[in-house]
Image: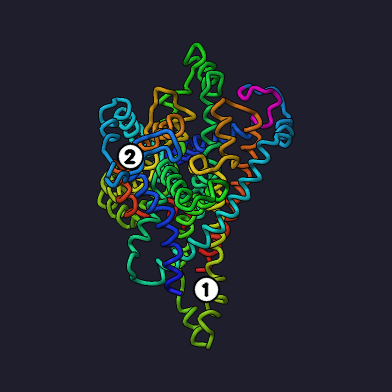
Amino acid sequence: MTARSFRLVALGLGFAFLYGPIFWIVAFSFNEGRLVTLWSGFSTKWYGELARNRRLVDAALFSLVVAAVSASLATLLGALAGFALSRLGRFRGRGLLAGALGAVLTLPEVILGLALLLAFVSIDAWLGGPGRGAWTIVVAHATLGMAYVTLVVRARLAGFDRSLEEAALDLGATPAGVFLHVTLPLILPALGGGWLIAFMLSLDDVVLASFVAGPGATTLPMVVFSSARLGLNPQINALATIMVGIGALAVLIAVWLLGRQERQR
Amino acid sequence: MRRWLVGVPALWLVAFFAGPFLLILKVSLSQAVVGQPPFTPLFADGGFRGSLVNFAVLLEDELYVEAILASLALAASSTLACILLGYPMAWAIAGAPKYWRAPLLALVALPFVTSFLIRVYAWIGLLRPTGFLSALLQSLGIIDGPLALVPSTFAVALGMTYTYLPFMVLPIYASLEKIDPALTAAAADLGAKPGRVFWSVTLPLSLPGVLAGSLFVFVPAVGEFVVPELLGGPGTPMIGKVIWQEFFNNRDWPLASALAVVLLALLAVPIALAQRAGAPTAEGLR
């Protein structure tokens, strides 16, 4: 076998493995029958049923709000941490800050979820409130998301031409003006990309949310997970197809944003 | 300004990351009780009431030791499968024409960002007795009756390999791409055959990428919960699942905390190594 044909086989097998299951989900979301394993004709009826499933729709709307709020919080925190780590040089606790953010990225979610729940329970014990609810999910997702945003912001600032800021200062701009008119526009794509990553993470998480959610706060992944435990359901296929579409769109936007900043370098 | 840049994220991490970990340690030393919160206080009646009883239980009960060993073994086999599948992919992408590489890498990373839960769900449909794989193998005449691949330990390994494959491909690609083409060209000029060039030059130089990828797959795989819960049966007691069950089903928070402490101790070295290797997504996003 030549190197070229070996390459094609490796890529063909690899991508078939990666995309086969996704293709199956999308195809069977348009299947008419209730059986998710036997094709019986094209239909979009499961999308209709999905739209009428109040429990799923409510959970989806709730998840979108939680994802948007936690991603915004994560972007703010991650931008601050990214700036501190790339711009402040050495400071006390720098290693600890970088280490903690790295640990958030690699730790098993079960541990992070358990740790956060214990923290929320203690807060309630000390302050006598406010109890768990949507806010605890937002805090958990913001903590996870900020680690990813920091990564993206640091990568962006590492390839940043600081002479642009120096030039603006030489030309008489105030430090605040430099930040607003030079620095911010240059890192905006990284902030946008980071926000999208944090948003998708929140929309996908079932472990952290299950641990920290208060009564009545049910996210979409929690509903999907509990119905997947019970078995297959064509409505979930339809929902998955929509989520795959949104996910693919978000990635394309993120790649475009981050690719554009690459070309600007 | 400086104070805010460091202070705000640092305070956040102390409150919602470092602090909570100390709480896990604290709760692991107490006992389960019926009540709110469902564990005994560490200090009561003017004295220290903590004990290592939970850890003794973990060591004595075979179930927990087995779960830990099974998790390590399953994570290791998934890591190996990721290397066997991911290395050729990374190698093929690194050798592709330059304008093809970025789109191919994006295709590798794309499933990772599409819902993880949904992709694991898909495997239930593919691996069921009436599912695609069973039907395919039957029509090819390889098996006679329907084949139930889910729930099984094999399905868990397959699911984790599938989930974490991008984490392996991206760092290996990054290390392959860094190899100076002059080195392989020199080896070829000196008479080495392509296979020899690969074994003596390319492979050794790409090992840092293989090591980084292995850590990024192994660490989350050991503590994985969703994959064993959806694809594995009661015969696959992974540690992440056991922590979950102790916590949610048995409401034994101290024992769940003790398990988390043990898992953390097991993963401390691989996590520290993974930190030094950088984060997987950093490679993917660049």
Which residue is painted at 53% across and 60% down in the image? A75
Q: Is residue A189 magenta?
A: no
Residue B191, position as x, y percentages in the image: 26, 48
| Visible residue check, residue A9 | no
SS of the residue under disc 2: loop
Which residue is painted at 50% across and 81% down in the image? A175
Q: Which mark is residue B30?
A: 2
Give the residues drawn in magenta, as a range. Answer: A28-37
Which residue is painted at 59% across and 46% down in the image? A247
Camera-nearest residue between B284 and A147: A147
Q: Is residue A34 magenta?
A: yes
| Visible residue check, residue B134 | yes
- The answer to whether tags 2 and 1 share a subunit is no
SS of the residue under disc 1: helix
In this rendering, the label closer to the viewer, 2 or 1: 2
Decide: few, some or many residues near mark 1? Use Cα within 10 Å; few <14, some 14-19, many ≥20: some
**From the viewer's perspective, is A128 left or right of B87?**
right
Q: Quadrant of residue A228?
A: top right
Camera-nearest residue between A143 and B203: A143
Q: Quadrant of residue A102?
A: bottom left
Camera-nearest residue between A205 and A196: A205
Q: Which mark is residue A183?
A: 1
Q: Are marks 2 and 1 in contact (CB under 8 Å)?
A: no
Q: Majority secondary structure of the magenta segment?
A: loop
Residue B41, position as x, y percentages in the image: 35, 43
